[in-house]
Image (cartoon, coloured by chain):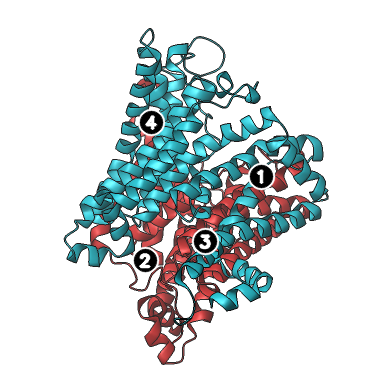
Chain colours: A cyan, B red
């Protein structure tokens, strides 16, 4: 115990700083370990990470690509983080993302000829609703019979993927060799960022990035200042105490998992409206699963999700350059992701490194 | 059409499809009975499937591939055990990390070793254990065809899974090992008090589940397919967890539930042969095992009781 001699604000800042240091140090250790793996596989890790840096932040186009990759991760990261806050593990964000993408691809064509702002709003709302709906049955089963959401949302991911696969090869298929839906008319797409930020010229970064950042701030506010957010956190923290305190645990569980699904659905909407402008089988590069890593690295803090999404967006944007220039297979980024999850979750290693580095400061804050 | 559908091949195919699910489900049973949740069965199976092909490829022996697959499963299990038992990390989070790690490792090694993503080169598969010749015609021929196909046509790991289910079920309720294992998941503090090492017991349970998941992977690549494709486990590790719950955390029940899922899978494959008659898109058949899993979980879970200390790290105190 520090005792009365230590000024409270100092302790708070120190604690906050150390809280922030754990993810940072974890990322550093993960990069170190993956360097060893890259070395063992017979490649040059320094060249690899240099190429990765160049591919993710080396210029306007590269920064734009990083923003582009970060966009869906913000939504799925928020989705998983919101679930975790309520004590739910939405491992099936990928499935809700698929359904969001599906609704955007369908609605975008149906709304052809309507004003662009109206379309954007309608498509976003519809995508969130479909994402929520796709999470509703797992949520109901969790609340009513206690079926674990890890299994049910995972199963709904496979069901959703096959549904999309059927629709793009069958009823919604456009003419042509490749099974995909028709290209969206311009009024059903999200504007590109370079229209206002010429600096990002030639990158595909789109308005979805801004939507994601604003949404993160909004979710932060919801969790912190609304009764909905309070109830979600209370149930996540201690369901029994919440029930005693008059919060309906089943109702809160259903609401929280549906909100999570809605957020994940938006990732699919913005990918279709901003990047691919149509729907096909493989339109998501596992963003729903990477969202888990994003949420954990952010320690389920919505503001932290923005930073974590940009980091994983950079890894993904830089992976291509790394493969091209250092010949390291791009899939190494999944190994880095896994290492980061382990290190953040276990904390001990990072805390030990921090203690060694800042022994003085820790003893003061003690 | 029904006669074309309900052939001995359908049932044999169900048993084959059930095998990887059953092995992983029994792994899940043993792990959860010891109080450790293992959602990394998917990743352990995937890594086992890949390393099985690698082992078989470099030695030319499918049997050696089985060994490397099991070792691969155990090695990821060791990571899970260290994270969740020693470091007391959230078990579901650790499992997720292992699943992502397995996806990354298999994809990465695939490109390092084969120079391309997707599917590995084919390897020699394990052959069926028996090959008897029965009567070729007459009334007995049909009976023989059923017996031969449904009971005598399988590869070694398929039989091994049946033995593991029966043996494991017996051992869980009739041996000192089984009693100790159950105590770890129900009341670790009590187990500790009477001198059972919770840490050692849980480590061994997690490692056994990894070995079984690795064996499940070997069944996929070295018996069923003959090569490895990225992501080929396709959610089987999660279906296996559902089978374990449906089987009420017993090895025999896990096998039985897996047989149900295996039958659904065999049926959907078989039904696709009748596409001209039924006219339902293939994707709906492919959904069947996943839909069934949800239905089964929805109908059974309220009445199935999980080990009391499941998912909780144990702190000696």
CA gap, disc 4 and disc 2: 30 Å
**Horizontally, is A43 left or right of B53 in the view?**
right
CA gap, disc 2 and disc 3: 21 Å
Q: N-terminal of the two: label 2 or label 3? A: 3
* Pick the front one: B1 or A177: A177
Q: Are marks 3 and 4 in contact (CB under 8 Å)?
A: no
Q: N-terminal of the two: label 2 or label 1? A: 1
CA gap, disc 2 and disc 1: 33 Å
Q: Does any portion of residue A91 appear in the rendered image?
A: no
**Horizontally, is B34 left or right of A136 in the view?**
right
Q: Does any portion of residue A31 appear in the rendered image?
A: yes
Q: Position of residue A26 (x, y in %)?
A: 62, 59
Determine which residue is flagged by label 1. B107
Q: Residue visible at 67% across and 27% down?
A: A61
Chain ID of residue with mark 1: B
Q: Residue visible at 35% across and 33% down?
A: A128
Q: Position of residue A25 (x, y in %)?
A: 63, 60
Determine which residue is flagged by label 3. B94
- Quarter of the image with the N terminus of chain B is top left
Determine which residue is flagged by label 2. B249
């Amino acid at each position: 115990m520090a005792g009365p001699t230590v000024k409270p604000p100092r302790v708070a800042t120190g604690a906050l700083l150390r809280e922030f240091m754990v993810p940072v140090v974890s990322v550093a250790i993960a990069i170190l370990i993956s360097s060893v793996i890259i070395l063992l596989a017979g490649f040059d890790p320094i060249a690899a990470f240099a190429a990765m840096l160049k591919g993710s932040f080396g210029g306007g186009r590269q920064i734009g690509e990083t923003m582009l990759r970060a966009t869906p991760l913000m939504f799925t990261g928020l989705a998983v983080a919101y679930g975790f806050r309520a004590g739910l593990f939405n491992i099936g964000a990928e499935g809700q993302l698929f359904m969001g993408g599906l609704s955007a691809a369908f609605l975008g064509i149906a709304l052809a000829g309507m004003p662009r702002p109206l379309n954007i709003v309608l498509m976003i709302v519809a995508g969130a609703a479909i994402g929520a709906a796709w999470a509703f049955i797992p949520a109901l089963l969790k609340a009513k019979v206690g079926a674990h959401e890890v299994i049910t949302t995972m199963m709904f991911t496979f069901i959703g993927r096959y549904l999309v696969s059927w629709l793009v090869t069958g009823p919604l298929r456009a003419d042509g060799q490749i099974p995909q839906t028709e290209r969206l008319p311009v009024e059903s797409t999200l504007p590109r960022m370079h229209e206002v930020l010429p600096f990002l010229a030639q990158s595909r970064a789109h308005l979805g990035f801004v939507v994601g950042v604003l949404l993160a701030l909004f979710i932060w506010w919801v969790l912190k200042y609304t009764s909905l957010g309070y109830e979600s956190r209370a149930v996540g923290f201690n369901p029994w105490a919440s029930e005693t305190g008059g919060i309906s645990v089943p109702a809160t569980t259903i609401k929280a998992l549906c909100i999570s699904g809605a957020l994940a659905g938006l990732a699919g909407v913005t990918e279709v409206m901003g990047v691919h402008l149509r729907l096909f089988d493989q339109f998501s590069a596992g963003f729903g699963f990477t969202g888990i890593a994003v949420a954990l690295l952010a320690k389920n803090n919505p503001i932290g999700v923005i930073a974590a999404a940009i980091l994983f967006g950079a890894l993904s944007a830089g992976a291509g350059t790394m493969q091209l220039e250092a010949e390291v297979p791009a899939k190494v980024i999944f190994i880095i992701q896994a290492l980061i999850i382990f290190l953040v979750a276990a904390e001990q290693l990072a805390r030990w490194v921090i203690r060694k580095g800042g022994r003085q400061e820790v003893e003061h804050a003690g | 059409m029904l006669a074309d559908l309900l052939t001995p091949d359908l049932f044999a195919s169900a048993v084959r499809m059930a095998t990887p699910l059953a092995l992983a489900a029994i792994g899940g049973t043993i792990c959860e009975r010891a109080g450790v949740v293992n959602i990394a069965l998917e990743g352990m199976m995937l890594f086992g499937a890949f390393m099985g092909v690698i082992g078989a490829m470099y030695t030319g022996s499918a049997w050696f591939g089985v060994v490397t697959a099991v070792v691969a499963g155990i090695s990821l299990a060791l990571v899970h055990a260290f994270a969740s038992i020693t470091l007391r990390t959230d078990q579901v989070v650790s499992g997720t990390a292992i699943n992502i790690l397995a996806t990354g490792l298999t994809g990465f090694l695939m490109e390092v070793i084969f120079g391309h993503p997707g599917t590995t080169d084919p390897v020699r598969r394990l052959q069926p254990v028996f090959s008897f010749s029965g009567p070729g015609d007459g009334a007995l021929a049909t009976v023989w065809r059923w017996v031969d196909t449904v009971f005598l046509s399988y590869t070694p790991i398929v039989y091994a899974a049946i033995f593991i289910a029966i043996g494991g079920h017996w051992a869980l309720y009739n041996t000192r090992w089984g009693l100790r294992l159950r105590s770890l998941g129900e009341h670790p503090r009590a187990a500790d008090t009477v001198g059972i090492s919770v840490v050692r017991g849980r480590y061994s349970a997690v490692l056994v589940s990894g070995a079984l998941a690795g064996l499940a992977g070997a069944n996929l690549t070295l018996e069923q397919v003959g090569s490895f494709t990225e992501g080929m486990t396709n959610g089987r590790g999660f279906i296996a967890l559902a089978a374990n719950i449906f089987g009420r955390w017993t090895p025999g029940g896990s096998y039985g539930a897996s047989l149900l899922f295996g039958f659904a899978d065999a049926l959907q494959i078989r039904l696709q042969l009748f596409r001209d008659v039924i006219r339902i898109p293939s994707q709906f058949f492919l959904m069947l095992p996943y839909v069934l899993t949800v239905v089964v979980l929805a109908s059974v879970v309220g009445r199935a009781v999980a080990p009391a200390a499941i998912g909780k790290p144990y702190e000696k105190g």
